[in-house]
Amino acid sequence: MATNTDPKPAMLSIRLDAGALSALDSFAVGRGGRSAILRQMIEQVLEENSGRPLLERREGIAHNRVSLRFTDAEISVIEYRASQRSTNRSGWIKALVRRHLALKSRVDDGLLNELAPIRMQLLRIGRNLNQAMKAANLRMMDDGDKKIENDLRRIADMRMDIAEQIAAVGDAMHGDVSYWKVAD
């Protein structure tokens, strides 16, 4: 961990959605800015977990090999499940084992990369629907136009549908581990 006495601290880069970054910036005002807040958070987490055993992670290729034998039926199921996750059977088995060893919080970065832009598009659609709803409400208030009530109900229904889809995609991104749960 870099401290103030380190001559050349290391650099860390992260990606946040715009809303989270805006909230972080608001929180960081008067507290030293983004870097100071993130540094404090990281140091706090490291300090709180200092008594926990650390796992050494090797960069690159895993060097330990395990040999497994499966029946034809088991291989068929593994290949089918792997294809559903856009991976090969070795990748699927590794992800399953790593999930059960709790070495990785997310098991499918490919799925995450596919879902992130979908969620962003849904958020944009939701914002557009909110703007349409506001505009329609203003029109109804200004003109007293009661004909627009049906349109407002349809927009409200669409907003609910989009909100449900955003939540479902978010759950898939963050709760993807449910796929890997099996009975003990």
Image (cartoon, helix red, strand yellow):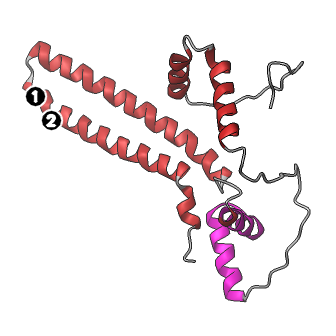
Task: Locate the N terminus and report the quarter of the image it occupies.
Answer: top right
In this rendering, the answer to whether 172 lies above or below 116 is below
Q: Is residue 53 left or right of residue 175?
A: right
Circle 2 residue: 150
Between 158 and 93, which is closer to the camera in this rendering?
Answer: 93
- Other residues around mark 2 within 10 Å, as few (<14) / some (14–19) / many (≥20): few
Residue 32 lies within the magenta run:
no
Q: Residue furthest front?
A: 51
**Picture quadrant where residue 77 is located:** bottom right
Q: Is residue 36 left or right of residue 134?
A: right
Which span is picked out in magenta?
Answer: 72-99
Looking at the rendered structure, the secondary structure element under dot 1 is helix
Circle 1 residue: 147
In this rendering, the answer to whether 5 lies above or below 52 is above
Q: How many marks?
A: 2
Looking at the rendered structure, the secondary structure element under dot 2 is helix
- Other residues around mark 1 within 10 Å, as few (<14) / some (14–19) / many (≥20): few
Residue at point 65% right, 38% down? 45
Between 17 and 36, which is closer to the camera in this rendering?
Answer: 36
Q: Is residue 118 left or right of residue 50?
A: left
Most frequent secondary structure within the magenta stretch:
helix
The x, y position of residue 4, in whole percent, is 80, 19
The alpha-carbon separation of the residues under discs 1 and 2 comes to 7 Å
Dot 1 and dot 2 residues touching (CB under 8 Å): yes
Q: Which mark is residue 17?
A: none
In this rendering, the answer to whether 35 lies above or below 168 is above
Task: Locate the C terminus and report the quarter of the image it occupies.
Answer: bottom right
Residue kind at label 1, given as amino acid type: Lys
Q: Is residue 17 left or right of residue 135?
A: right
Between 30 and 167, which is closer to the camera in this rendering?
Answer: 30
**Picture quadrant where residue 107 is located:** bottom right
The x, y position of residue 83, in whole percent, is 66, 67
